[in-house]
Amino acid sequence: MMVEPNFDALQLIAEIALGIVGFSAILIGLSRASDGFSDPDNFRIQLLTYSAFGAMFGSILPFAIFDNQNNDLSWLITCWILCVYSVIGLIIFPKKMLSLRIQGHREIFPIKLYLFQTGILSAIFILSGLMITGLISQMTNIYTICLILFLVQSTVAFIRTMFFRVK
C-alpha cells in the first residue's frame, strides 16, 4: 500500500506557485496598459504561467483525490494527470522556442536554455510515467520533485522575462 503525499510540502509548493502566478497576472495587466509584449516575452510569460499553474494545481490535486481508502488508485490518478500535463507542455513549448530561434531570437533562446527547459518537461514526463508503471516506489518524494521542477522552470522563465529583454 502506498503512503499519502507530504501535504505540508504540497501546501508550501502551492503557496510559492500562487505567488508566481500572481506575478504573471501583474505582468499581463501591465502589458495591456502599453503596447503589449514582444513574441519572446509573450512566450516566456506563457511558460512561466504554465509551469506555475502546473506546480500549483499539482500540489492542490492530492488534497482532493486522496481519501485514505485507496492510496494506490489516488496515486495513479494523480500521476496520470501530471503526465498528461507535462505532455501538453512538451507539445507546445519546445516547438514555440525553436520557432522563435528561427525568427532571429537565438541570443535570447540559446540552445542550452532550450535543452534545459525541454529537459525539465521531459524529466517530469519520464518520472510521472515511471510512477504510473510502478517502476518508482518513492511516490511522495518523486511527485514532490516533479512539482519542484515546475517551480524551477517557472523561476527561470521569470528571471529571463525580467532581466533578458528584447532590444
Image (tube, rainbow, N blue to C red):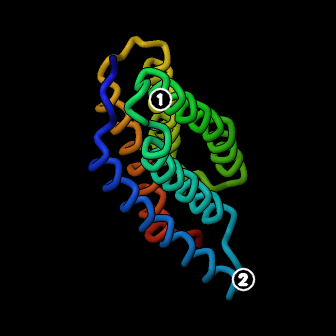
At 29% from the left and 23% from the top, the residue drawn is 138
Residue 7 is marked as: none
Residue underneath mark 1 = 74
Tell me which residue sits at (42%, 36%) in the image. Answer: 67
The image quadrant where one finds the C terminus is bottom right
Q: Is residue 107 visible?
A: no
Q: Secondary structure at mark 2?
A: loop
Task: Assign the N terminus to one quadrant of the image.
Answer: top left
Q: Position of residue 102 (x, y in %)?
A: 70, 47
- Residue kind at label 1, given as amino acid type: Ser
**Residue at the extreme bottom of the image, as rendered:** 33
Separation (CA) of disc 1 from disc 2: 46 Å
Dot 1 falls on a residue whose secondary structure is: helix
Residue 35: assigned label = 2
Mark 2 or mark 1, which is nearer the start of the sequence? 2
Closer to the camera: disc 1 or disc 2? 1
The amino acid pointed to by label 2 is Asp
At a point 52% along the width and 48% down the height, the residue shown is 54
Query: Compared with residue 150, is residue 87 higher up or lower down, i.e. above or below?
Result: above
Nearer the observer, 72 or 116: 72
Q: Residues within 10 Å of mark 1 (few under 14, many from 20)?
A: many
Q: In this orientation, which residue lies closer to the viewer: 104 or 68?
A: 68
Near mark 2 (Cα within 10 A), the count class, few <14, some 14-19 or many ≥20, is: few
Residue 153 at x, y = what percent? 44, 49
Q: Which residue is more in the foreground, 164 or 74?
A: 74
Q: Look at 36% across and 45% down and name the residue there.
A: 148
